[in-house]
Image (cartoon, rainbow, N blue to C red):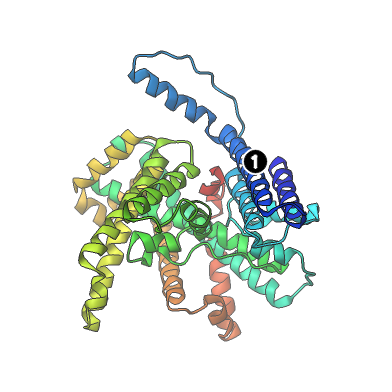
Amino acid sequence: MTSTFITYLSGIVMERIKQSDREENKKIKLKNWTVAASFVLNISMLFYFKYINFALDVMTDILGIFHISVNAPTFDVILPVGISFYIFQALSYTMDVYRDEIYAEKNIFRYALFVSFFPQLVAGPIERSKNLLKQLAKPNDFDYTNARTGLLMMLWGYFIKVVMADRLAVLVDTVYNDVSAYHGMELIVANLFFTIQIYCDFMGYSIIAKGAAKYLGYNLMSNFEMPYFSTSIKEFWRRWHISLSSWLRDYLYIPLGGNRKGTARKYVNLLLTFFVSGLWHGANITFVVWGMFHGICQVIEDIFRMIFGKISDRIKNVAIARVWKGINVLKTFILAAIGWVFFRASNISQAIQVLKASVKLDNVSEVLAGGGIYNLGIDKMGLIMLGIAVLLLFVVSIMRENKINPIEWISSKHFVVRYAAYWLIVVLIIFSLDLTGKEFIYFQF
């Protein structure tokens, strides 16, 4: 509520400054002060609720290196659900008004609806005022096609969340709750499953949010575009959590200078952006390392590209080009999976332990035979259901990668085929309902 009120007032103030008779220099200064005040107040709230104890712990550790003992207080703070999402969404409105990219909303109730729009309030996507706020300003009547499409999107989102993410979470949590009890191949399997789990969990929520909004007649931005088909980490971030990566690009990376002030400055800006991205995800050094890992990967990719050029452009043979693309997709997937180890681990030492143990390919034959997987908290029936779900997700992902809309495609089929597919998804969800006590991963952010 406080964030909503502050950003609403900042928009009104900047609009009045623009319409005033003041000199242009004074207008610019007042607008700068207004947007700065909005940012400082909002980031201060985010810092207190999410990072105050983490910052005090880091300060205590740094002072401890110099043998300075400090009794830092611990604040008993209840983290508001979705605070990172709606504060970033509100701040994007402030910046858009500042840049004259959107009008200042006069109706506080409409603006409050934009900031607290319930489908995407707690876990995104982080909407832009240029998209959602403009839609809220227009009359919206019930539309059967929108409602039907929205319900199908929600059904698919629940399938990805309940059948896949929650079932994979059982295996992943079993391993990470006692890492020392498992060997290399088991850890590799768990990490590969977490790579799929976090994608399904977050993408599932995003699709549910889009579906709920679509049912109401509103279009939210896409948050995922098959990121694991990316050929580079840079492309991965154009496809993964698009609303956050584009937010950081537009409101942090570009204002810092982007790539306009030389190569060295570009890399500094890039690393700083990914440092913020990691910190945004949580008050733990593991998230910072995860963010910096992705930033460093992008820097290395850029240096490699500068030295050798874009190799794919020089390959004329179609078959070789496809093989080269496949190699790059696999490379990017492996790098992303390595990064997810830090994201999932409770601390750096656990992440290093997992990576070290993963290098030793112990228990390969046992895991490949299935016995090792059954020891990871999931039974044979669960594996069968998971296999069906993964296959279905892969088929749908291939369709989307080839610009085929799965909902439109299935809607064009005979009603028997359509409803058989719908009921298959419903049955799989029902049989997985014992796992639905697990919350969405991104609720914690």
Q: Mark 1, residues whose alpha carbon is within 10 Å: few (<14), some, or many (≥20)?
A: some
Q: Quadrant of residue 411?
A: bottom right
Which residue is at the front of the view, 361 or 232? 232
Viewport quadrant of the N terminus: top right
Helix, strand or loop at mark 1: helix
Residue type at mark 1 is Ala
Q: Residue at 79%, 52% (x, y): give it.
A: 108
Residue 402, image x, y percentages: 43, 78
Q: Residue at 25%, 83% (x, y): give it.
A: 318
Q: Residue farthest to the front? A: 23
Residue 62 in the figure: left or right of residue 7? left
Residue 62, image x, y percentages: 38, 23
Q: Is residue 235 visible?
A: yes
Q: Which residue is mark 1?
A: 37
Q: Residue at 58%, 65% (x, y): give it.
A: 221
Residue 242 in the figure: left or right of residue 378? right
Residue 410, relative to residue 431: is it above or below?
below
